[in-house]
Amino acid sequence: MADVTISLIGNGPIMVEGPISLLDQDDNPVELTAGKAIFLCRCGQSEEKPFCDGAHKRCGYVSTSPAPAA
């Protein structure tokens, strides 16, 4: 079984690496490039949601570190 790694980038997006499937709000698959990491927005300002477009740099997003316990 292949590993999936999810990393929080400091003051930036969530990076997801590994074989994943991403579904939209209607459960339709989102086309992804195999073998390429994806970056998901966590600042809420991206024009390309759920993907990061670098808006965190423009809006001054600051992440909490370390991440709180789940």
Image: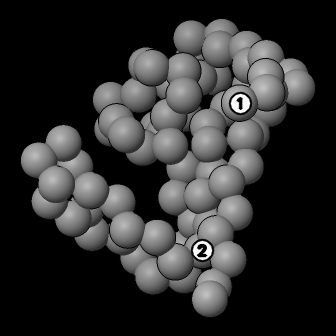
Q: Secondary structure at mark 2?
A: loop
Residue 64 position by quadrant: top right
Q: How many residues crowd mark 2 within 10 Å: few (<14), some (14–19), many (20+)?
A: some
Observer-side mark, 2 or 1, equals 1
Q: Amino acid at mark 1?
A: Ala
Q: Are marks 2 and 1 in contact (CB under 8 Å)?
A: no
Residue 46 position by quadrant: top left
**Residue 41 image offset from top left, x and y in percent:** 50, 34
**Residue 16 image offset from top left, x and y in percent:** 60, 58
Which residue is depicted at the point 71% across and 30% down? 70
Q: Is residue 30 above or below residue 18?
A: above
Q: Which residue is mark 2?
A: 18
Disc number placed over residue 43 in the picture, else none: none
Q: Is residue 45 above or below residue 29?
A: above
Quarter the N terminus occupies: bottom right
Q: Give the colour scheme shown.
A: one colour
Which residue is depicted at the point 79% across and 22% down? 68
Q: Which residue is mark 1?
A: 70
Which residue is depicted at the point 22% across and 49% down? 24
Q: How many residues crowd mark 1 within 10 Å: few (<14), some (14–19), many (20+)?
A: few
Nearer to us in this view, 57 or 12: 12
Q: Is residue 61 left or right of residue 42?
A: right
Q: Amino acid at mark 2?
A: Gly
Q: Earlier in the sequence, mark 2 or mark 1?
A: 2
Q: Secondary structure at mark 1?
A: loop
Cα distance in 3D space between marks 2 and 1: 22 Å
Which residue is depicted at the point 52% across and 58% down? 38
Total residue callouts? 2
